[in-house]
Image: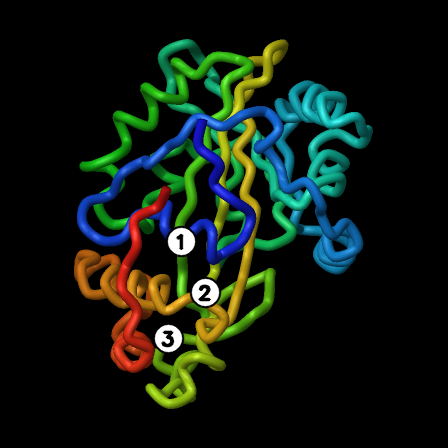
Amino acid sequence: MAALGFSVEELLPRARGGGALRMGLSALDKADWLQPEPDLAARAAAFDAHPDSVQLTPDAEAPGAELAALLGTTGGLEGAARSAWEDMCLLTQPAPDAPFHLIGAAVAFPTDWRPADKLGLPLAALHAPIHGYQQQLASGVDRFMAGLRPGRIFGRCNWFVSPTPALRWIADAPPAEAFAHVTAENAGETLFIRSERQTLRKLPRSGAVVFTIGVYVAPLASLSPANAARLAQSLASIPAEEAERRGAPHFAPALEAYAARRGGAIEEAA
């Protein structure tokens, strides 16, 4: 089974680059489900400072308690998310043939979304901002979720370019303003690469699917030349609509020039 790793440097080679959207899932061992050495103080501080990070429907009570028990803790979904590095969401089907809906979210480190805006939505609506999701991924994701068996764990990862090292990132400023200070000369210190290590696991008793999101952030300068080159290549090949959503026109030229200066060659993931 694959081991995704628990850092931006390890995750980037396994993330989608450009081209069409894909699930990109890998089967994981139980030992690789969650970060083994979580910073629980950072988690507690984020949840305490932002009570709206936890959003629950009444349907989340039973699976939240089941998840907490699985992790050896109490406090339902919030207790589970406070006990691990990963943010945690619960999804269920309101009827056997219905799409999965978000019934609970405990998200201390969001990547530009607010749980209150998404609670109760089906998967397609959750991913509405992602260009191409409905056409390229929606039906496949729905089938995968419905067929997921308890005991199996699958993981994937992604990447974003952020103007801040903050673990909690809500992009309140437009990209033109947020990245205005970035140049080819300072991109290594002013651009931050953010990777979400995501996993899916079905709970045996409730049948709810647990979606975990482990967030890792690193300055561009800390990455290997190969990973800097990988990012530059990905930015050059993602669809135009996706590039616009990511704010890429406002930082990509600087990142690409920085990566070219470092001269890395892209290496395939093991």
Query: Mark 2: which secondary structure?
Result: strand
Query: Mark 1: which secondary structure?
Result: helix
At label 1, the amino acid type is: Leu
Q: Position of residue 179 (x, y in %)?
A: 40, 80
Which one is closest to the eye, mark 2 or mark 1?
1
Residue under label 1:
12
Residue under label 3:
175
Q: Position of residue 107 (x, y in %)?
A: 61, 47
- Note whether residue 251 is visible: no
User: Upstream in the sequence, badge 2 or badge 3?
Assistant: 3
Q: Pointer 2 and pointer 1: residues touching (CB < 8 Å)?
A: yes
Give the mark count: 3
Query: Mark 3: which secondary structure?
Result: helix
Residue under label 2:
193
At label 3, the amino acid type is: Pro
User: Upstream in the sequence, badge 2 or badge 1?
Assistant: 1
At label 2, the amino acid type is: Ile
Q: CA distance from mark 2 to mark 1?
A: 9 Å
Which one is closest to the eye, mark 2 or mark 3?
2
Which one is closest to the eye, mark 1 or mark 3?
1
Q: Pointer 2 and pointer 3: residues touching (CB < 8 Å)?
A: no
